[in-house]
Amino acid sequence: MKTIYKDSVLAKKLIIGTVLCSSVITLILTCITLYTQYSRDINQLNQSEQIIKNSLLKSLSESVWDYDDKLIRLQLEGVLSQPYIVKTHLALVDGQKFSSGAIEHDWVKVYTFPIIHQHRDKQRELGTLTVTADLHDIYQELVNAAALTLLFNAIKTFAVMLFMLFLIDRLIGRHLVKIVANLEQVTPDAPPLPIQLKRSGPLKADDMDKLANAINAMQQRLFNAHQAERLASQERAQLQEKIINQNQQLAQLDRVFTMGEMATSLAHELNQPLASITGFADICKRFVGQDPINTAMVEKTLEKVSSEAIRASEIIRRTREFVRDRTPQRGSHKATDLVAESIAMLQDMATKNQVRIDFQTLSSSPSIDVDKVQLQQVLINLIRNAIEALKQRQHAEVKIRIEVINQIVIMHIADNGPGLAAKVMQNLFKPFITTKEQGMGVGLSICHSIIEAHGGNIMVTSEANKGACFSIQLPLSPNQENTSK
Ligand code: ADP
């Protein structure tokens, strides 16, 4: 019983409901009982009235006519024997008055009868008889009956309520407490603890067992589903990691492939500082051979040799960095620097193919948080594709433009070539789609995944024989957001 009483809203509702319902029923029953009793008493009173009318009035009129004082008084007292009649009063027309009994309470009912005597076919009114009935006893009995009925019903209600509470606690309450305690311990990761209801004595399995079994089954299903979902999400995460790794390997392969393609350009680019070094070394040799040695010129020439050697080593560093298998590392980089370096790596290829690269540098370049090598890979892929598309075309030009709109840095790489082939447009950014004999068809798909991994977007517009334009959108570096508009 403790279980259901303690803080149980159910028990409170039950008590209030039972008391209310029982009170209403008790009230209705009591009213019916009291009304029946009241009708019975009033009936009795009416019977007394009839008796007076039918049997007493005639004999009383005889006694009055005979002026039998003693008999009149006797008859008036005889009326008092009728239930509830407490007083009789006879007022004769000659002024004589007879009274019997007394009125003790306020609740009374008064009956008045004329005393008429039949004499030689003539009726003569001799006086008036007033009979007073005391209703106090009737009402008192009603009040007593009401009090008793209410008391008995209250005791009955209380007893029934206690019994109901006991039954509900035994059949429902204690099981609910057990179910709640069990459910409070449920966690999605732990295997469910099945609810086992206490069953003792003659109580057999009932609806509560069905409920417990349903909850047990539901818990098991939820646990199984959660486990399956956890396994699936682990597998998804592993797959995702595998895809990322494969993408990185593919991107690295693409860079090696690109570098292979650009080997001649690279050799040509490297050749320039090497030729300069050879030239400056010859000049230096000449200055050293002079007498006296022109040390100032020797120093100046050696400085030039050194700076050309640095330029050559920078080309080699850049190339190694581009091809090296590495984990991406993001940092804040100026968009113009990234574009300029990418153009530098492709400049020789562009010159050989008579393609003009038009890049308008900005005075204050926006910064973007990117992996430098990955972003250069994207730019090189797009610019190289543009140059290749422009091969043997008149007025071939690649225009590169950078703008910032709403904190987004947009880099446009546009060419005036043939535009994208329908096959490429339909499978845009899907791997292994190429129109080139030696092409791998992975460049655009790698560009797409790199830009997406940086939280950006890559879009294309293309018109046949007018050209294609690739637009890369990347968020402006947070460091620069406050200063740039
Ligand atoms: P690949 O260069 O090895 O073919 P990509 O994925 O870089 O692989 O390019 C896929 C195809 O997209 C190219 O074969 C080419 O047909 C087309 N393409 C890419 N850029 C341009 C461009 N600027 N103009 C015309 N076609 C292009």
Image: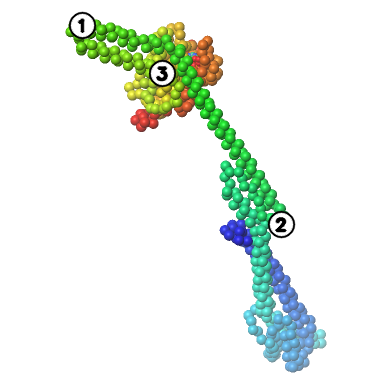
**What residue is rendered at 30% in x and 15% in y?**
307
Q: Which residue is mark 3?
A: 320
Indicate the amino acid at tag 1.
Gln
Question: Closer to the observer: label 2 or label 1?
Answer: 1
Tell me the distance, in whole angstroms, between the alpha carbons under discs 2 and 1.
Answer: 122 Å
Q: Does 185 appear above or below 47?
A: above
Indicate the amino acid at tag 2.
Leu
Residue 343 placement (x, y as % from top left)? 39, 16
Label 1: how many residues lie within 10 Å, few (<14), some (14-19) or many (20+)?
Answer: few
Question: Closer to the observer: label 2 or label 3?
Answer: 3
Label 2: how many residues lie within 10 Å, few (<14), some (14-19) or many (20+)?
Answer: few
Residue 369 placement (x, y as % from top left)? 40, 27
| Residue 290 numbered tag | 1
Residue 368 placement (x, y as % from top left)? 40, 26
Ligand 1 has an atom within 8 Å of the beta carbon of the residue at disc 2: no
Q: Which residue is mark 2?
A: 203
Contact (Cβ within 8 Å) of mark 2 with mark 3: no
Tell me the distance, in whole angstroms, between the alpha carbons under discs 3 and 1.
Answer: 41 Å
Quadrant where the N terminus is found in the figure: bottom right
Toward the viewer: 151 or 351? 351
Q: Does 468 appear above or below 227?
A: above
The extreme right residue here reads 120
Instruction: Tell me if 148 is positioned left or right of 331 in this view.
Output: right
Q: Does 188 appear above or below 85?
A: above
Residue 288 placement (x, y as % from top left)? 23, 8
Is residue 125 in sight in this rendering? no
**What residue is rendered at 79% in x and 81% in y?**
54
Tell me the quarter of the picture where residue 393 sits.
top left
Tell me the quarter of the picture where residue 118 sits.
bottom right
Indicate the amino acid at tag 3.
Arg
